[in-house]
Amino acid sequence: QVQLVESGGGLVQPGGSLRLSCAASGSGSTLNYYSIGWFRQAPGKEREGVSSISSGDGSTYYGDSVKGRFTISRDIARNTVFLQMNSLEPEDTAVYYCAAARLYVHGSMWSLTRIYDYWGQGTQVTVSS
């Protein structure tokens, strides 16, 4: 069992930045074995993939709408994954979730919600002036 706790959300003005954290805990929850994905869901919309970082080699993937603005990274010693979000836009407003998959995520599979075994409770990000 893996527990995931997101933090770092909040209210920010357009053009601003936020850094989200996803702390993993539980038996065998090392990031060497789990790929971690970030997803978001806005009211009335489907959950969409934002970014993912693979277990092992740490390959990274991004959704088209966030490429060049968001950066995913991890601290294996702290079992924590980060999502640095820059140049935020009102369209980025959503609840952001992190999720863990007990496999090596690669290619287009990174954005499939069904491959992720564990999910956090989410953190709200609101971009507004």
Image (cartoon, helix red, strand yellow):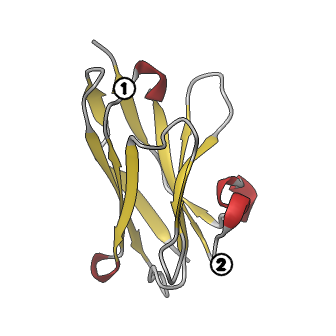
Q: Nearer the viewer, residue 119 or 12?
A: 12
Residue at 63 percent across and 78 percent down: it is: 104
Quadrant for residue 88, please give it: top left
**Total label count?**
2
Picture coordinates of residue 47, whole percent (x, y): 64, 39
Q: Is residue 114 above or below residue 46?
A: below
Residue topped by disc 2? 103
- Going by the picture, which residue comes out furthest to the front? 68
What residue appears at the point 48 percent right and 22 percent down from the top-left corner?
91
What percent of the width, then of the height, locates residue 3? 47, 68
**Horizontal side of residue 59 vs 126, given as left or right:** right
Residue 99: give x, y in percent of width and height: 55, 60
Q: Nearer the viewer, residue 73 or 12?
A: 73
Q: Are circles 2 and 1 on residues that touch, CB within 8 Å?
A: no
* Residue farthest top in this picture: 129
Residue topped by disc 1? 126
Q: Amino acid at mark 2?
A: Leu
| Amino acid, disc 1 | Thr
Q: Residues within 10 Å of mark 1 (few under 14, many from 20)?
A: many
Which element is circle 2 on? loop
The x, y position of residue 126, in whole percent, is 36, 26
Q: Is residue 73 left or right of residue 78?
A: right
Q: Tell me which residue sits at (56%, 77%) in the image.
A: 1
Toward the viewer: 31 or 17? 17
59 up-or-down from 61: above or below: below
**On the picture, is 6 further left or further right than 60?**
left
